[in-house]
Image: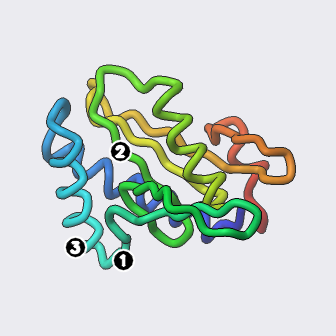
Amino acid sequence: MTKREYKEMYDVVGAAMEVFNTLGRGMAEAVYQEALAIEFQQRGMKAEREKMLTLSYKGFPMQKTYFADFYYRGILVELKSVEEVSSEHRAQLFNYMRITEKYRGLLFNFGEKSLHTERYLYLPEEDDFVLLNQDNYKSDIDD
């Protein structure tokens, strides 16, 4: 991941923080999704809302589709408004990252006392997902 790509993730987190600071916690996910769309627009960030994700099997398109809450410059963004993020919520984001072959993903939970944010990198060659945190994110950024 380049510094520019990391900054793009940082920008999305900043927009989500503004939404959380303005609306507080515990509203319906759809409220946060609409507010975040407005925040992206105000910041001049061209994010796609309800991005349709298509699948293929051995090169053949499949009818099954999924929808990511947002897609911004190669970043898949999933929103939740629940008491606590679960493994199922993470699995949803991971599946979206895997099927689209996008290696950056953000998971936000607006249902906790403070905005819960998880930043992930997908490593397709290892079929693994890395949670970026203050201890490891610098090692994953190229100059």
**Of marks 3 and 2, the one in the foreground:** 2
| Mark 2: amino acid | Leu
Q: Mark 2: which secondary structure?
A: strand
Quadrant containing the C terminus in the rendered view: bottom right
- The disc label shown at residue 79, or none: 2
Q: Residue drawn 35% across and 35% down?
A: 109
| Residue 78 point in image, percent of width and height | 41, 48
Quadrant of the image occupied by residue 110: top left
Alpha carbon distance from label 3 to label 2: 19 Å
Quadrant of the image occupied by residue 117: top left
Q: Mark 1: which secondary structure?
A: loop
Nearest to N terminus: mark 3 or mark 2: 3
Q: Is 80 displayed left or right of 21 in the figure?
A: right
Q: Write down the residue under mark 1.
A: 46
Q: Residue drawn 73% across and 69% down?
A: 59
**Of marks 3 and 1, the one in the foreground:** 1
Quadrant of the image occupied by residue 15: bottom left
Q: Residue drawn 59% across and 45% down?
A: 95
Alpha carbon distance from label 3 to label 1: 10 Å
Q: Is 115 displayed left or right of 31 in the figure?
A: right
Question: In the picture shown, does residue 31 fall above or below 109?
Answer: below
